[in-house]
Amino acid sequence: MKIIVCMKQVPAGTNVEIDPETGAMKRLSSATRTNPYDLFALETALLLKEKMGGTVTVLTMGPAQAESMMKDAYACGADEAVILSDRKFAGSDVLSTSYTLRQGIQVLGGADLIICGRQTTDGDTAQVGPALAEHMHIPHAAWVTRIEEVTEKDISVQQKLGDVTQVSRIPFPCLITVEKDMCVPRLPSWILKKKTADRKVRFLSFEDLPNQDLTRYGLNGSPTAVERMFPPEKAQKQVYLEGSTEEKTKELFDILVSRKII
Amino acid sequence: MDFLNFDAEACTLCGICVNVCPFGALKFEKNGIEVGESCRMCGLCVRKCPEKAIRFEQKANEVNKEEWRDFLIYAEQEQGKIHPVVFELIGEALKMAPKVGYHVNCVIAGGPGTAENAKDLLEYGVHKVFVYEHEELKWFRADCYTDVIADCIAAVKPSSVLIGGTELGRSLAPRLATRFHTGLTADCTKLDIKDNTDMIQIRPAFGGNIMAQITISRSRPQFATVRYRVMEKAKKVENPDGEIIRCKMTDDMVKSSIEILSAEVLEKKKSLEEEDIIVVAGRGAKNETGVALCRELADALGGQLAFTRPMVEDGFGDTAHQIGLSGRTVRPKLIITCGVSGAIQFTSCMNGSECIVAINNNPEAQIFNTAHYCIVDDLNQVVPKLTELVRNRKED
Ligand SMILES: Cc1cc2nc3c(=O)[nH]c(=O)nc-3n(C[C@H](O)[C@H](O)[C@H](O)COP(=O)(O)OP(=O)(O)OC[C@H]3O[C@@H](n4cnc5c(N)ncnc54)[C@H](O)[C@@H]3O)c2cc1C
Ligand SMILES: Cc1cc2nc3c(=O)[nH]c(=O)nc-3n(C[C@H](O)[C@H](O)[C@H](O)COP(=O)(O)OP(=O)(O)OC[C@H]3O[C@@H](n4cnc5c(N)ncnc54)[C@H](O)[C@@H]3O)c2cc1C
């Protein structure tokens, strides 16, 4: 069984601020980490491999520094790691990100199962998985909370969709996006780390991809455009209640009653 | 960088762009300013450059916007009923539609009973409802649902498609947008429309620290998802005059490779999003005793108890009762936060509430920037007293 796990490197913190006067953003720190939700995708893949045999390939689109994330994936038990890296991919939104991943998967000869995390912590759209499945014309199940059964030709998964818990069987090739907490991600093993120290991470650039139409990649291939960014609005008028604890509580109660809120 | 172009003639090396870049991607080099790998194409430098020396090299890929008209709303059904987010989407679309002379239409797909449900939509002033009813559509399957809604979009050619940001909607929307090679803006908190029919879509990013305004100006339709309880619900109209259109179904359209083995409806409890009154226990509640005080207040008010993320991580509640970016968005009539500091990841998902009360013993706590009524005091004192007042009144 061949599994591909999509992972993304994200900024370590999300504490950006905007100067309300100038509209300029205060700089993000350059520290990065693996998107925490993707660790559940990797763990799910490794558990399936332990059960069914086969290989786990980790795939990312991003800058070359994602190599450190890939080394960690090796130390967790991944067999192959591939980075799609090219300046031509910069500025990608969901449509072109998922298209580029799709092209990369084609170079890798496809897969039985593709696993994505539920979302990232930076773009936070939770769209890349389903979009990738659509590019590949394969079925998908999002928000998977449990793997019920896996065979040579299909996988049965549990999903929570609103008030409905659904179990469905999907034939390979297919894609799933997994919820956090469906498993406990392992930590990189020291022994594996030493064993895989020499294993190379494979880099693919634009020239390596089957479709050489530049309008499908990066900024050119991205229909969404960020027009501007600004800080969130501040709250409206407010009242501080004064006096002893009794007085403050009573005043609040009276306000809530008179405003017909309670 | 191939897509960011510096005009060396016009550039005065003033350095404004280097300073505004949030990603530290711009650097002074021998031949002027250079763009590094960390550039995310946010375009801040392009707009801030006083000399207009920086340009996006964009390939125009214009569609004829005239060919794409009106709003189309995906009317999700949950347990045989229209999901309430749909009425909020209708409300939002009806605010934008008159500005560009558009109608608001809906598409609804599902098992038996769907056409009957479609009638409910007309009461809110919807122009046309396109109905796809078929036994095979009883449960959601991403592949055939995409085929069915795509059929409608291809026929109707809407300018904008709005989809609820539910689990189902967020599984469906990216497939549809991909199929039409167009953009999808996730979890918009504000929508408006320009004269040229481009939607102005505002959404939080970077954990809610920043709002981003996003447009989809080169392709159609424009897709957007909006989470439940973010927009105001539409009002019923006096004389609804919309029509229901039964769409032709082919067996191919409902063919799916996904086989549903079981589907279980969880006991219908009022979800946190539907709650009118919420009491939140933050880390200031500290332990079982503090949480119990908050729970008693919630019970006395007939509402629900919710938590901040650290409290859920400590096992006091489940994620369905976590408010915040990685939890739920709520806008109840009343929310009382007890021992909550007011981090942006929390407040951005409850600041639309009608009445916000904060109880925190630290006068500097950020939550007081969001709250309407501020009580600087120990929650262990205030909460039980308030509970008592509420209980006594109920007994009157
Ligand atoms: C402020 C801001 C707002 C944005 N808003 C939008 C928007 O509304 N619509 C839009 O189309 N784009 C938007 N983008 C761009 C979007 O963040 C990028 O397209 C990004 O490449 C993919 O989206 P995501 O981070 O949301 O991933 P998600 O869709 O949240 O990721 C889901 C899963 O897909 C996989 N995955 C995601 N990215 C990669 C990758 N690079 N390599 C390998 N696997 C990956 C991972 O398994 C991940 O867990 C925005 C960007 C910014 C900075
Ligand atoms: C990407 C990302 C996503 C996140 N998502 C979420 C999310 O979904 N939801 C969420 O809540 N957080 C989220 N967070 C975490 C968030 O940043 C805060 O850490 C969190 O909200 C703080 O929770 P708190 O207010 O309960 O705790 P604290 O920040 O520890 O605040 C406790 C407060 O209680 C007060 N207090 C203490 N004792 C008393 C007393 N006796 N009486 C009255 N007041 C008292 C203190 O003054 C303090 O203000 C997220 C963070 C990130 C980076």
Image (cartoon, coloured by chain):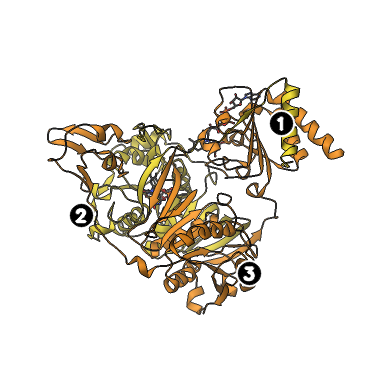
Chain colours: A yellow, B orange
Residue pictured at 73% horizontal, 31% vertical:
B293
Question: What chain does badge 1 belong to?
Answer: A
Mark 1 or 2: in front is 1
The amino acid type of the residue labelled 1 equals: Leu
Residue B392 on image: x %, y %: 84, 34
Mark 3 or 2: in front is 3
The amino acid type of the residue labelled 3 equals: Asn
Mark 1 or 3: in front is 3
Q: Which mark is residue A252?
A: 1
Give neighbour class at mark 1: few <14, some 14-19, many 20+ (Cα, 10 Å): some
Residue toward you, B251 or B245: B245
Q: Which mark is residue A208?
A: none
Mark 1 residue element: helix
Q: Is mark 2 within 8 Å of ligand 1?
A: no
Q: Is mark 3 within 8 Å of ligand 1?
A: no
Mark 2 residue element: helix
Extreme right residue here?
Answer: B396
Residue B257 on image: x %, y %: 49, 69
- Residue under label 3: B239
Residue toward you, B287 or A29: A29
